[in-house]
Amino acid sequence: MDGSNRRIVILGKTGVGKSSLANTIFGEELFEIDDSLDSGTRKCQVETRSVNGRSITLIDTPGFFDTDRSEEELKSEIVSCIIKCAPGPHAFLILLKVEKVTEHEQAVINKISQCFSEEAFQYATVIFTHGDQLRKGQKIEDHVQKNEFTSDLVKKCGGRCHVVDNKYWNENPKDEYRSNKFQVEELLKSIDKTVMENNGSCYTNEMLQAVEEEIQREKKQIQLLPGDKSEKEIREQAEGRVSTKLSVRLAGIATGTLLGALFGVVVMVELVVVALKNIAAGATAAGGAAAGGTVGGAAAAAVIGASAVLGAVIGGFKGYNAAEGADTPLEAALKAAGAVKSGDLHVLD
């Protein structure tokens, strides 16, 4: 085990226990738990602590794979997650409940599978919550094999799966297996092994690298300013600046496209990188954002349909030209949408 920080992104639908798992891993109540099952006001939360000799950063996400949430609800939080995990996470934790898989759970699993690239799955582990639902003496591997959907997902993740119970397994049980302390240590060992198998690297792609490069540029600018800021404060300020820029440039990019780019789906990475390329040059345009949503964003949101994605890419180039000078996402979207509607733009002119 090396001494570097581990960035871990926790994923799953609302109510599956993401925040509770984060608190269980850290052994303290740091992450806000919303018992109302309505995560509409939830924000991407990030905390760093030392766990069993490891520096761990947990990134709690607000239900990226919920099937009933609007595009606008999720977009800013996906951008926030992209910023916080740049240049890339060391692990993705995909959460599911130990329970009978319904059509809704199947839809979530299908959406996860659509969004992840094969490479991203190399860094992913499936975590089952509500472990008290396991039958006496049953291991999570036995439960997984009883359902084709969960079995296929775990296989994609290299067979990595663990189980916790954020409510009942915090004490010292007679059965060591049914102990969060035991399960968290096994999970961290699994992540250590994954990092080792990936030559000590985190998961990254062109988009995450581009975001990290922009953060580093902002850090250099901030360091030139008067004042005595810590490295952490400088990083946070730089991330804030880049987040504002991305929100403008990605105004019309669909959430499915952003998720696909985060998880390495090649065409989605390329689409978002088009939107990011002019940040370093100081452009104030929407960087391939607004018209990307106008001219093909619906299909991009579904993360399928090559011809529609091509339309989104073309729209991205159009949107960059049209939205030049925009200061807000709304202004960017209106500029690009108006230009497309009027027919004033020519593809790649």
Image (cartoon, rainbow, N blue to C red):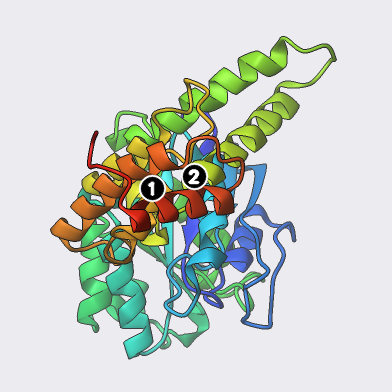
Which residue: 20% across, 60% down? 308
Residue lying farthest to the left in this orientation: 307
Q: Is residue 101 visible?
A: no
Q: Nearer the viewer, residue 65 or 169?
A: 65
Query: How far across and down, in percent of the image, does residue 28 sit?
Result: 73, 57
Residue matched to label 1:
262
- Label 2 sits on a secondary structure element that is helix
The picture quadrant where one finds residue 125 is: bottom left
Q: Residue furthest right?
A: 227
In the rendered image, which residue does mark 2 sit on? 82
Residue at 48% over, 36% down: 324
- The reply to whether callout 1 and callout 2 are in contact (CB within 8 Å) is yes
Real-space CA distance between mark 1 and mark 2, rounded to the nearest whole angstrom: 7 Å
> In this view of the protein, can residue 308 be seen by the observer?
yes
Q: Position of residue 50 (x, y in %)?
A: 65, 40
Q: Residues within 10 Å of mark 2 (few under 14, many from 20)?
A: many
> Label 2 is placed on what type of residue?
Ile
Based on the displayed image, in which of its 4 quarters is residue 34 positioned? bottom right
- Vertical order, 301 against 145 (above or below): above
Quadrant of residue 327 in the image?
top right
Instruction: Mark 1: give few (<14), some (14-19) or many (20+) Cα within 10 Å.
Output: many
Q: Which quadrant is the C terminus positioned in? A: top left
Taking the image as shown, residue 146 lies to the left or right of residue 238, namely left
Disc on the earlier residue, 1 or 2:
2
Task: Identify the residue shown where x is 50% and y is 27%.
Answer: 283
Amino acid at pointer 1: Leu
Q: Residue 21: which disc?
A: none
* Residue 135 image offset from top left, x and y in percent: 41, 88
Position of the N terminus, as image quadrant, is: top left
Query: Can you say whether 70 is above or below 121 in the image?
Result: below
Label 1: element kind: helix
* Percent position of residue 159, x then y: 25, 60
